[in-house]
Structures are given as C-alpha cells and as structure tokens.
Image (cartoon, rainbow, N blue to C red):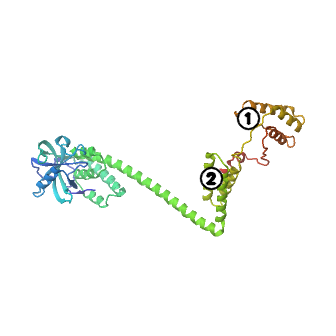
C-alpha cells in the first residue's frame, strides 16, 4: 500500500470548493513528461518507479538536481516501448523526485511524490525527452451531508478490507482515519485498489470528489465480497484438512491398539487372503475395481465395527462367484422330454412349459430368457424339477436356500447399506 502525504484541511458543511489538489502549489506552463506503464500516479501518494528507457533516464538526470517539477502520464498500451504523444493519456499527475537510486545494471530507481492533477494542452517536443504545455485540473469538493455519509461508508468498508487483507499492514487503517480531505482520501484509496488501469485512469480524470468516492465505494464493496468469500473457502479447507489429519492420527492410534491386542496380524492375514482371492477369481475389470475399492474400505474399518463383517461377507461372496467358469447348453428337446418323464410322473402342463422354454432358448440362444418360477408347498417336486432341467441341459445344479428370509432388503443385497 502506498504512503500518503496529507494535503487538505478538515471538511465542514459549506459551499462547494473548486481548486487543485495542492492548494498553494503553482504549476509551470511547460514540464517534462515521464511515461509510466501498468500504473497510475495520484496526487498525495509516494511511489517507486524503475526507469530504464534512455529518454526517461535523461529526464531524471536533468530534473533531479534542481528538484524540478515533471509530469507522470500513464501509457494507454503498456507494451509500447517508446511511447509518443498519441500513446499517452492527457490527464496525469505533476510530481517531484524524492530519491534517486542508480543500479549496477545501468537502470535507475526513483521515488516520486505526486503533487497535483494536470491536463496536457499540447506536446511541445519529443527530444531529448517528451515535453508538454499543461494546465491545472481543479478538483471539486461539495461539502454536504450526503458526502459525509458517503465518507463514513467508504471508511468502514475500507477498514474491513484492510482487516481481511493479509498483505496490507495494520498501520494503513490508522493512516486512513487521519485523512480528512475527501479528494485526498479518494486518491489514496484509488492508488491501492485492485482495479483495472482504465478504471484507475478514469478516477484520476474525474474532478468531482463525490463521484470518485462513489466509484471507489462500489469497487471496495466488490473487493470485500471477494475477500469474505475467500476467507470462507480458506476456513472450509482448513477445517477439512484438520478433520483429515485428526482421522489419520486416530487411525494410527487404532492400529497401535490393535497391534497390542494381536488383532493387526489377523487383519493383515485376512486382507492378504482376500487380495489373493480377488486375483484368482478372474472377475470382469469393472467388478475387480469395485472389489478392490471395498477391500481398501475394509483395511480402514475397525474390526469391531458392524461394517467390517458386512464388507468381509460381501467380498467372500463376490470372490466365490464362478466368474470364469462357463457351461455350454445342450438343448436337445427329445432328451429333455425323456429326462423329465423318467424323473417325474404326471405334471404334464409343467413339463410342456419347460419344453417350450428350452425350445425358445434353442431358437434364440442370444436372447434374454425369462426366469422360471415354480410355486407350491414343500414336497411337490419344485427342487427335483430344477435338477432334471439342469441334467437335461448339461448344467451344474446350484441350490440357494432362502428359507427363513422374510426381508426383501436382504434378498436385494441392501444388507450392505442398511444395518
């Protein structure tokens, strides 16, 4: 943040005042011009400048010993290396040199003090450096209650911004409170605001202090909103990191306790066993990724947790499925009829439906076949019919008993989600 040189008196209710930024200073008619890029100089501020162009170094060499006033004009395009009159704005700040530091590489660093606004009447020369005839640009301060209210709002918002900004010293708030002149306060804040070059130049060119403070108030409100959001995000990130670190420390402590109880060896053995089962199961890629993810969850779940048993049972079950084992169907209808007739007496309608099912499978082997459901009381032949169908098709018969299971969630597999 730039240093401010106070240049005004106290503000009282009274008529409108129109004058320059420094009330007792008289500008010469013609001054040398120092182009600056990516910055705008304001009255009452002190700013460092790196001078590298030959014309600019010549200007500093001529004016520094005599403490001559010169002009600071911002470039319209900062990429122009040798700016001419058309490349510069016509409103700038008259300044004096406070200090010159000559660097070993040949460049020159200067510290300048902005004094007052001026407007270029016309450029009078370009060699050995730019020169121009100028006239003062008076500022207007309307000492009204409306301006007082705006000043209070601007000060409060600026102090809030300073309190949230990590790179702004706390002394800036004290300096801000000591600036009583509205125009000087506007220039001080304009120099420190994070706004575009065009907006900074527009604030320099605006003579009315109230209008400048209005624009600055909007810019401060926007900057404050960004800072508050940034602090909120930082707090959330910090809270998340603290939570992650806390979980990590607790996990490490839990591992140490389990090692003392002899549970760690058991867990390591179980995890290694499940890893081998997953590798040998020859699962599809998507299934293997899911199984590995669940195994990772298992390693992070305490053995005393109910989830541990659920995950372990799920992994055991998924590893036992015959992922890589296939049986080729034998869809001989006549043989199936003989097997069904040999194993069961009667049941003609059921046998006919089974043969229809097999005939459809034979005609459309790639189609999605329906699921046969045999309903009836115990002992009427449901299981034996399934065995006959498997033998007729050359398939292995697998029986999964659901006796005693009444919860639909268990059958659907929701047991892993709802405990």
- Mark 2 nearby-residue class (10 Å; few <14, some 14–19, many ≥20): some
- Tell me whether the residue at label 2 lies in contact with that at label 1, contact meaning CB atoms closer than 8 angstroms: no
Q: Residue 84 at what x, y percent from top left?
A: 17, 43
Q: Is residue 245 left or right of residue 415?
A: left
Question: In the image, residue 255 lies at what x, y percent?
Answer: 60, 65
Between 193 and 385, the one lying in front of the other is 385
Quadrant where the N terminus is found in the figure: bottom left
Residue 268 visible, this angle: yes
Residue 370 is marked as 1
Residue at far right of view = 345
Q: Quadrant of residue 198?
A: top left
Question: Which residue carries the number 2 mark?
Answer: 294
Question: How far across and down, in percent of the image, does residue 323 sit?
Answer: 69, 46
Q: CA distance from mark 2 to mark 1?
A: 32 Å
Looking at this rendering, what residue extends furthest in the top direction?
363
Circle 1 sits in a helix, a strand or a loop, which is it?
loop
Above or below residue 273? Residue 34 is above
Q: Residue at x 45, y 56 (%)?
A: 235
**Label tally:** 2
Q: Is residue 419 visible?
A: no
Classify mark 2: helix, strand or loop.
helix
Which residue is more in the foreground, 407 or 62?
62
Give the left or right position of residue 151, taking residue 126 as reference: right
Badge 1 crowding class, 10 Å Cα cut-off, few under 14, some 14 to 19, many 20 or more, is few
Vertical arrangement, residue 248 with respect to residue 351, above or below: below
Q: Which mark is residue 20?
A: none
In front here: 176 or 362?
Answer: 362
Q: Position of residue 189 (x, y in %)?
A: 27, 52
* Residue beneath the point at 85% across and 43% down: 378
Among numbered discs 2 and 1, the one appearing first in the sequence? 2
């Amino acid at each position: 943040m730039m240093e401010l040189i106070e240049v005004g008196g106290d503000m009282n209710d009274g008529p409108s005042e129109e004058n320059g930024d420094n009330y007792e200073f008289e500008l010469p008619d013609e001054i040398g011009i120092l182009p600056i890029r990516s910055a705008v100089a304001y009255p009452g501020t002190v700013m460092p400048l790196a001078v590298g162009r030959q014309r600019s170094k010549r200007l500093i060499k001529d004016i520094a010993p005599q403490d001559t006033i010169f002009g600071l004009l911002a470039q319209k395009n900062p990429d122009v290396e040798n700016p001419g009159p058309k490349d510069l704005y016509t409103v700038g700040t008259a300044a004096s040199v406070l200090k010159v530091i000559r660097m070993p590489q040949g460049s020159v660093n200067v510290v300048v003090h902005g004094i007052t606004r001026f407007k270029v009447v016309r450029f009078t020369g370009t060699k050995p450096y730019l020169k121009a005839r100028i006239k003062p640009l008076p500022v207007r301060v309307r000492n009204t209650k409306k301006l007082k209210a705006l000043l209070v709002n601007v000060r409060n918002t600026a102090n809030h911004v300073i309190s949230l900004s990590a790179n702004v010293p706390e002394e800036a708030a004290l300096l801000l409170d000591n600036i009583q002149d509205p125009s000087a306060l506007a220039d001080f804040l304009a120099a420190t605001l994070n706004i575009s070059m065009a907006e900074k130049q527009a604030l320099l060119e605006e003579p009315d202090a109230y209008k400048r403070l209005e624009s600055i108030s909007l810019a401060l409100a926007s900057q404050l909103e960004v800072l508050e959001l940034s602090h909120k995000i930082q707090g959330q990130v910090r809270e998340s990191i603290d939570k992650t670190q806390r979980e990590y420390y607790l996990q490490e402590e839990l591992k140490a306790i389990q090692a003392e109880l002899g549970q760690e060896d058991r867990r390591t053995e179980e995890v290694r066993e499940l890893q081998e089962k997953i590798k040998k199961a020859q699962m599809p890629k998507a299934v293997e990724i899911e199984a590995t993810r669940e195994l990772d969850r298992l390693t992070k779940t305490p053995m005393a947790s109910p989830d541990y048993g659920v995950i372990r049972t799920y992994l055991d079950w998924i590893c036992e499925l015959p992922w890589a084992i296939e049986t080729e169907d034998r869809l001989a209808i006549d043989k199936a009829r003989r097997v069904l007739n040999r194993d069961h007496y009667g049941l003609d309608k059921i046998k006919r439906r089974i043969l229809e099912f097999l005939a459809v499978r034979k005609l459309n082997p790639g189609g999605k076949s329906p699921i046969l459901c045999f309903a009836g009381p115990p002992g009427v032949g449901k299981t034996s019919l399934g065995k006959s169908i498997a033998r007729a098709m050359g398939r292995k018969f697998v029986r999964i008993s659901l006796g005693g299971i009444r919860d639909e969630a268990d059958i659907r597999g929701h047991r892993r989600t709802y405990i």
